[in-house]
Amino acid sequence: MKKCRVVECFFRVLMIGSTALVLGSLILILGTVVWRGLSALNLAMLTQTPKGGYYLGKEGGILNAIVGSLYLAGGATLLALTISLPIALYLNLYAARSRRGELARLALDVLWGVPSIVYGAFGFTLMVWLGVRASLLGGIIALALLELPIMIRGMDEAIAMIPVALKEASYALGATRLETALKVVVRQTTPALLTAVLLAFGRGIGDAAAVLFTAGYTDRLPDSLFGPAASLPLAVFFQLGTPFPAVQERAYASALVLTVIVLALSLISRRLAGRLNKHVVR
């Protein structure tokens, strides 16, 4: 009995310590970004593109990177969603408990762990082979490949949580697998599907390696799918690489803008998920 109490106390302390470590790290990171970035953040930085000498400490802003990041991550997420949802539905309704389904999940887990620089290098190699230069389209495709395993596995786990009785009731009423997938499964898992999409979007908008070679970088706003596009992670990287303290402070301001964008989207998605939960059968 005494041994059980010692073990229980040990794991309780371990859990509390782990939670404190994670929360402490989060507060430290956010505190550093806010403390160093808030002083450099101003309206001109959010509404202007870089002017001549911006990276030397002169006037300008990061509007090009903000718009470019939203285009890149938004386009990649839409492309990945178009591919991911049918695959997740297939894995659960057509290939459930089959060997090919397990192999597909294993492959997705492996792809999830592949470093983003590998996706960037693959996209760059493919673009060279096709004779395409760094562009917004190339960045979208590279980020879509990066987001695919995250989105598919998230949706897969969400759909797997649907009660079997609910699907069987749909079949008993004469619905086909496709009708069950679209009218029952998707409707019941919409809040969880939104979470999977948000996770993938957050990974895409915060990644620098995948777009470094595929999307390139420009001080102009993106005006074509075949032109280069800037991104906030690369803006942070380039500004931190300068020897000028004022520009380095702007890098933290850029990181703060990126954090606020992800936080805002998280709050919006939670709000939507809360409303959609009303239609979920418990």
Image (cartoon, rainbow, N blue to C red):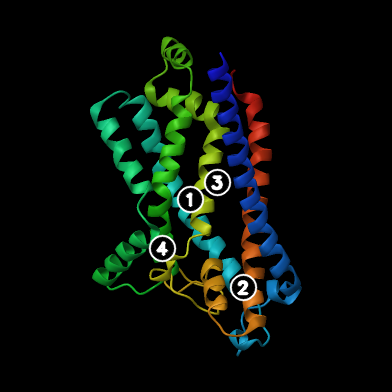
Task: Assign a secondary structure to mark 4.
Answer: helix
Label at residue 198: 3
Quick check: marks 1 and 4 in contact, CB under 8 Å? no
On the question of residue 222 being in view, the answer is no
Q: Earlier in the sequence, mark 1 or mark 2?
A: 1
Task: Assign a secondary structure to mark 2.
Answer: helix
Quick check: marks 4 and 2 in contact, CB under 8 Å? no
Q: Name the residue under label 2.
A: 251
Q: Is 8 situated above or below 35?
A: above
Task: Assign a secondary structure to mark 3.
Answer: helix
Residue 56 position, x and y percent, is 61, 88
Q: Which amino acid does label 2 sit on?
A: Ala
Mark 1 and mark 4: span between their CA atoms? Answer: 17 Å
For mark 2, does the 10 Å Cα neighbourhood hold few (<14), some (14 to 19), or many (20 or more) residues?
A: many
Mark 3 and mark 4: span between their CA atoms? Answer: 18 Å
Q: What residue type is labelled 4?
A: Ala
Q: Name the residue under label 4.
A: 210
Residue for point 59% across, 67% down: 67
Q: Which of marks 1 and 4 is nearer the N terminus?
A: 1
For mark 3, does the 10 Å Cα neighbourhood hold few (<14), some (14 to 19), or many (20 or more) residues?
A: some
